[in-house]
Structure formats: C-alpha cells, structure tokens
Amino acid sequence: MTPTPARPHLRIATEEAFAPPEMIRLYEKILAGSDVDPGFKGLMGFYMSSPSERARHIMRCLQDLDEVRLAHMDEAGIDHQVLALTAPGVQIMDTDTAVSFARFANDFLADAISRHPKRFSGMLTLPVQDPRAAALEIDRGVRQLGIRAAVINSHTHGQYLSDPKFWDIFAAAEQHGVPIYLHPNSLPRNMIEPFQECGLDGAIYGFGVETGLHALRIITAGVFDRFPRLQMIIGHMGEALPFWSYRLDYMHQATVRSKRYESIKPLLKKPSDYLRENFHITNSGVAWEPAIKFTQSIVGVDRVLYAMDYPYQYAVEEVGLLERMDMSAEDKKKFFQTNAQALFGIGPL
Ligand code: 1DF
Ligand code: MN
C-alpha cells in the first residue's frame, strides 16, 4: 500500500463517537423493558449483544477515551477528535432520565477533554425531550465546561426539530454561537418497516434518508429565517442534500406558488442558500474525492470538514486516500484542520 504522505496540516476528525459504560448499563435496562423501540433494538441492541468481531471492537472502542483510542488515533494519523455521545444518546430515554444523564455525559466528556486537551474536544449532548432543559444545558456546557458545540441524533421518539416547541434549543445555540451537529438516529417506528425488512435501515441508507429529511424539515419550517446566525453540521457528505440542491430549489418554489401545502410556506431564500449559509458538511463515512469536491463546489471550501466516524468506520487506509486527493494544499488544510478549528473553537494544537 502507498504510505500516507507527510503533510503540512493537522488532522481533526469531527464525528467521533464515545459511550460511558454507565450509558451501556442504562441501555441494557431499556432493552430489557417492554415495547422496545425497533430501531434502537436493531442498532444498539445489536452492537451490545452480537459476538461478531465488528460489534465487539466497536463496544470496546466506544467506552475507551484513553489508551485504546489514542493508540488508534496515532495509528491512523488523527491528531484530534471532536467527540460526540454515540447515537441515540439520551434521546431514547424518558424525559427525566435524559435530563439528568445529559449532565452526567457532558461532565464525563469534559473530564476526558481535560485529561487529553490536545487530543480531544467535544459536542454537548442535549435532552431534546425537554427543550428548556436542553437550552439550559447549552448554557451550562459553554460556561462551565467550555464545550462549544452540540449534537442532536435526529428525531426524538419520532418528533422533529421543525416543530416550534423545540425552538428554545435553536435560540440558545444561536445566542451562544454553538453549532448543532444533526447526527443520524435509528429510524422511527412509523418509518422503519420498509427499510428494516430488507436490511437497509442503518448506516447503509436509512440513516441518510431520515437525517436528510430532518435537515430539510428544519429548512422548510423557516428555522433559518427565524435564527439566521444558527449553524448546523450534517455528516455523510450532507446526507446527499448537496446532490439534491437543484431539484429542491425548483420544486420548493413550485410548491410554494401552487399553495399546495399549508406547511410549505415562502422562505426568504432558496433551500440551497441555507445549505451554503447555515450548514457545514463533514465527509464521515465517505472517503470519496468526487463527492467531496462536488460538495465543496456547492457549499464552498470553508464549509466541508473531515470526519472518520470512529469507531464505526475505523478505516486507516481512508486517511491516506483523502491525503492523496487532487486538491490544493490550502484547501486540504481547510478540510483537515482549519475549518474544524474555526467551527468548534479549537485553539492551537
Ligand atoms: C453506525 C454508523 C452507528 C454511524 C452509529 O452510531 C453511527 C453503524 C450508533 O454503522 O451502525 O454514528 N454513522 O454515523 O454512520
Ligand atoms: Mn456517526
């Protein structure tokens, strides 16, 4: 194999998952209960019980924020990880548990960052079920823990952030300059069947469809007209939304003009304008030069960032593949390092 070339930039990976052992214990209780969410059972229920090598490797890596993870980062040439509590995080829990566990998980994350400040930064977990508490946790996380981004794992028990009842979260994020990473979740009960019966509900396709839908719902609900400075992040090459831009713009306008739906109202800008002005896109799971360059051409080179999706896609060879992209040294440095430093407030490393 061609060795990974030396480079004039650091590598910051921006969608990297962890799980405190205490959360795995809590998930065991949820999975032992009645009427378990089928998506949760199919996802975390699988990883927590499968004897397969992949599942056991993932469970071990998720729960380590010291030797194992740092060794893997060194092996792959990753200088710094932006950590996020793995999906579904606290969003599968009941509201009271979500509120208290989010605080625990964020303190746990802040501890790991303080043990390895050059290697880790992170995103706050939010108890979306209680939007006021989630807004307060953004405030606490920024002021007390020094964490300057947040993650939301798509829908919460089938509910979407396009509903104004959640918009206290957006108000707090905008006020604090906290970008929100809209990360996939397993599919909600009312969507999963046609995906799961053919095995396509997970990261292979279902995640992208559902998270892309969620991002679009946020756009078409007018969230960015109400919160114009709010920044969101979406992974997996924008969950294909850049590729949809032309059709989204054309059909959004046509739908508004025909007054076909109460819920599709006029927006100040075209859907693709919000992608360019309110979204950052990571290449998590997609080490593919044509898709990365196409996305840069749609949203600009300052808004496309590197991510590995450790430990779900711990693929060391992809780092070299991305280093060898035919791209200027300046743009490559933006992709691997400086866009992430600016967005997540990561200082000199
Ligand atoms: C998987 C993929 C699981 C991603 C994840 O979290 C995840 C997977 C539970 O392959 O089952 O974050 N991903 O982002 O692609
Ligand atoms: Mn992920």
Image: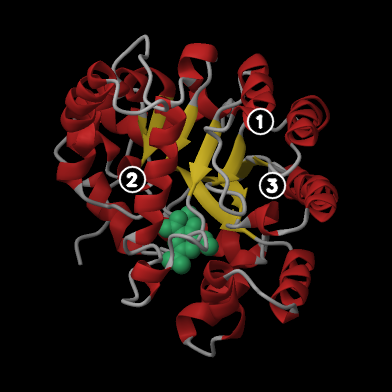
Q: Quadrant of the N terminus?
A: bottom left
Residue holding disc 1 = 165
- Which residue is most to the top? 268
Residue 116's mark?
Answer: 3
Number of on-image labels = 3
The reply, left or right, for residue 101 in relation to residue 298 is right
Identify the element where label 1 is drawn.
helix
- Give whichever of discs 3 and 2 has the lower sequence position: 3
The type of residue carrying mark 2 is Glu
Q: Position of residue 291 (x, y in %)?
A: 19, 43
Residue 21 makes an appearance in the image: yes
Q: Residue at x 53, y 13 (%)?
A: 226
The local secondary structure at tag 2 comes to helix
Tag 2 residue: 239
Q: For residue 66, which quarter of the picture?
A: bottom right
Vertical position of residue 203 compared to residue 140: above or below = below
Few, some or many C-alpha atoms within 10 Å of disc 2 (few <14, some 14-19, many ≥20)?
many
